[in-house]
């Protein structure tokens, strides 16, 4: 591990101040001036790193992906089976994200706006999206699965993770316990479906699903394109 | 067909004016005063029918469900198979909603806020949600499917419809062509999965899915409860 450069430390300090203030005062009511003051940097310096509050959120997304990757490095490097690894990847995401649940619920309306650069499907979120899909690509490495399904599987699993995130944002159970239940019990089903994807009767269904996924523009998610339809609309 | 009462006509006129003004000027910037003026009623009268703009959106949701129910009455009464009916129900929804796509994209961030009464999962949206689920309950009538799955199937299909809506809102292809492709090609897969749900190997997966669906609080959606977790959080 090399020590992060000074500029990386400054970036991280600004993002941390921003997240704390967003959480305390709301995203809309927090100014760049307040964030800079809290982080102990000049307003000019804050704007140098993050030209807008939206860039700050992208910085937050990037940090979350880095934290997620670190949190699941061990399980991904292990010789566990697919289901164990997928459970590990998604519970690692829940652990890393747990401190931000209140913020995420309050902030979600911004990310859910299809025209917002803060949408997980936007061009601007391409970096964080690629990072997230790369985790699932590593997970899929060496899994026995119908070959036609393999290519799209990282994007499909990332989309499933987005579904989990959608549920988590709405989850009002204590400590988001219901999302934990959802993850731990849905992953064995996905593992089983992948095994069944090599059985002739079901294989046609999973192949059709993968082809459909490409045809409606979701197959390009991992290529930092914009939302579905941009590529062939 | 009986003629709608005068009060129903007034309600409808107010909702129509509201939708047009929301579309033209945005939800946030449209006032009740402007809506009343456009509908040719007094401000007091408009407030009598709709105490707030949020109530207007609930009125819009209710109207959409009524229009959707009318648009798929014929296909639901026919002797088509499950896949044909599900395709009919979802394409009817797309047809009815198509004029509002621009509004829905712009408005979506409000409905996506988990704490908003405008969320499809909120207590306040219970009326529209029950109406939507009732359409799927009619659809499921007489379908051959694993008995343990049958009970939850209307809610599961409605959730699938919400997934289609989520995709549709993000769909930037011409006339939302990609959503049409998604519906026409995913419904035969669902039909096939339901057939397979009676085969021992897959049945355990669909039963686990249905049980999980109940355990994380989604089984109460059709009972006008609040979002997942409220009932057992």
Image (cartoon, coloured by chain):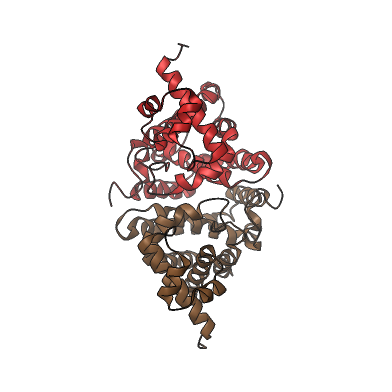
Chain colours: A brown, B red
Work out whether residue A28 or residue A89 is closer to the camera in this orientation and state it.
A28
State left or right for residue B226 relative to residue A210. Answer: left
Work out whether residue A2 or residue A107 is closer to the camera in this orientation and state it.
A107
Work out whether residue A55 or residue B196 is closer to the camera in this orientation and state it.
A55
Q: Is residue B63 visible?
A: no
Spot the residue most to the bottom: A2
User: Which image quadrant is residue A29 in?
Assistant: bottom left
Q: Which residue sits at x=51%, y=40%?
A: B161
Spot the residue most to the left: B232
Vertical comparison of A4 with B104: above or below: below
Q: Is residue B159 visible?
A: yes
Spot the residue most to the right: A232
State left or right for residue B77 relative to residue A204. Answer: left
Q: Which residue sits at x=57%, y=37%?
A: B24
Q: Which residue sits at x=57%, y=58%?
A: A117
Q: Which residue sits at x=37%, y=67%?
A: A99
Spot the residue most to the top: B2
Residue A69 location (% of width, % of height): 50, 73
Residue A115 location (% of width, % of height): 58, 51
Residue A32 location (% of width, % of height): 47, 67
User: Which image quadrant is residue B104 in?
Assistant: top right
Vertical comparison of B31 with B42: above or below: below
Residue A65 location (% of width, % of height): 51, 69
Vertical comparison of B56 with A132: above or below: above
Query: How many numbered discs sit on the rendered protein?
Result: 0
């Amino acid at each position: 591990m090399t020590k992060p450069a000074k500029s990386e430390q400054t970036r991280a300090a600004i993002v941390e101040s921003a997240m704390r203030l967003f959480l305390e005062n709301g995203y809309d009511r927090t100014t760049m001036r307040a964030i800079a003051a809290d982080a102990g940097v000049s307003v000019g310096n804050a704007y140098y790193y993050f030209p807008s509050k939206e860039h700050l959120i992208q910085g937050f997304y990037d940090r979350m992906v880095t934290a997620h990757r670190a949190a699941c490095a061990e399980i991904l490097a292990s010789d566990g089976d697919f289901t164990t690894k997928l459970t590990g990847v998604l519970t690692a995401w829940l652990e890393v994200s747990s401190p931000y649940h209140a913020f995420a619920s309050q902030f979600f309306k911004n990310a859910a706006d299809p025209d917002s650069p803060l949408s997980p499907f936007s061009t601007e979120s391409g970096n964080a999206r690629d990072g997230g899909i790369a985790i699932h690509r590593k997970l899929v490495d060496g899994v026995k699965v119908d070959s036609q399904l393999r290519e799209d599987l990282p994007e499909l699993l990332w989309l499933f993770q987005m579904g989990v995130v959608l549920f988590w944002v709405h989850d009002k159970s204590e400590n988001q316990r219901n999302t934990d239940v959802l993850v731990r019990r849905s992953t064995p089903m996905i593992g089983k479906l992948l095994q069944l994807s090599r059985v002739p009767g079901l294989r046609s269904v999973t192949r059709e699903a993968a082809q459909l996924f490409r045809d409606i523009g979701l197959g390009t998610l991992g290529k930092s394109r914009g939302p579905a339809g941009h590529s062939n609309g």
